[in-house]
């Protein structure tokens, strides 16, 4: 394995204050509706190759964020009999019924999303964005101006900006 080398790696603290959320935010991003079923949310996350998306209501207002962690936690909780139907199935034509678990997943994005919104104005400095992400253990912040969702800043967006 080849070691990483640094070429003139310098710390530019002023850049963290001069760069703002609007400079690094994603302006094109996927969202889901609060009523979207979980299997649809999983498909959206997989297709977009992202770890989380904003959840919107019918009027396009942000209600929360749903992430792969929310979905994993849901699947981990799906192991009790109250979460499943048991179907008798004759798989091998022997007349012997085998029982297979069929997960009933009627949950939707609005049921699993985190409703605690973390957002910044477009003018928030990269230093402030980073501080909020670290202190609140967040991987994405919404960029909002006058209750309108303008963009999204992820940890990768922050790292790309610092690496420039």
Image (tube, rainbow, N blue to C red):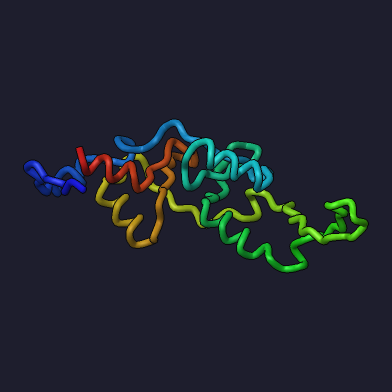
Q: Is residue 88 left or right of residue 71?
A: right
Residue 114: x %, y % from top left = 55, 56
Which one is in front, 17 or 108?
108
Taking the spot 61% from the left edge, 63% from the top edge, the residue there is: 76
53 horizontally vs 5: left or right: right
Is residue 29 positioned above or below 78 on the image?
above
Looking at the picture, tell me which residue is in the foreground, 87 or 93: 93
Residue extending furthest front? 94
Identify the image quadrant of the C terminus: top left
- Relative to residue 77, is residue 20 depicted above or below? above
What is the quadrant of residue 125 in the picture? top left
The location of residue 1, given as percent across then percent down, is 21, 48
31 vs 66: above or below:
above
Along the viewing direction, whichever of 91 and 82 lies nearer the viewer: 91
**Residue 124: percent from the left, percent from the top?**
31, 45
Q: Position of residue 141 (x, y in %)?
A: 41, 48
Q: Which residue is drawn at 63% across and 41% down?
A: 33
Query: Which residue occupies 68% across, 45% down?
Result: 37
Q: What is the number of callouts on the image? A: 0
Give the residue at x 51% y 44%.
53
């Amino acid at each position: 394995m080849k070691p990483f080398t640094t070429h003139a790696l310098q710390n530019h603290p002023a850049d963290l204050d001069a760069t703002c959320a609007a400079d690094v935010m994603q302006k094109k991003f996927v969202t889901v509706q609060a009523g979207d079923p979980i299997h649809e949310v999983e498909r959206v996350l997989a297709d977009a190759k992202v770890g989380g998306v904003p959840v919107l209501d019918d009027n396009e207002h942000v209600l929360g964020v749903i992430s792969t962690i929310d979905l994993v936690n849901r699947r981990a909780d799906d192991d009790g009999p109250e979460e499943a139907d048991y179907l008798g199935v004759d798989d091998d034509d022997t007349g012997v019924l085998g029982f297979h678990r069929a997960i009933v997943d009627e949950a939707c994005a609005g049921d699993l999303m985190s409703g605690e919104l973390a957002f910044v104005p477009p003018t928030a400095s990269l230093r402030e964005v980073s501080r909020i992400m670290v202190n609140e253990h967040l991987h994405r912040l919404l960029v909002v101006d006058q209750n309108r969702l303008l963009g999204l800043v992820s940890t990768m967006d922050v790292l790309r900006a610092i690496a420039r």
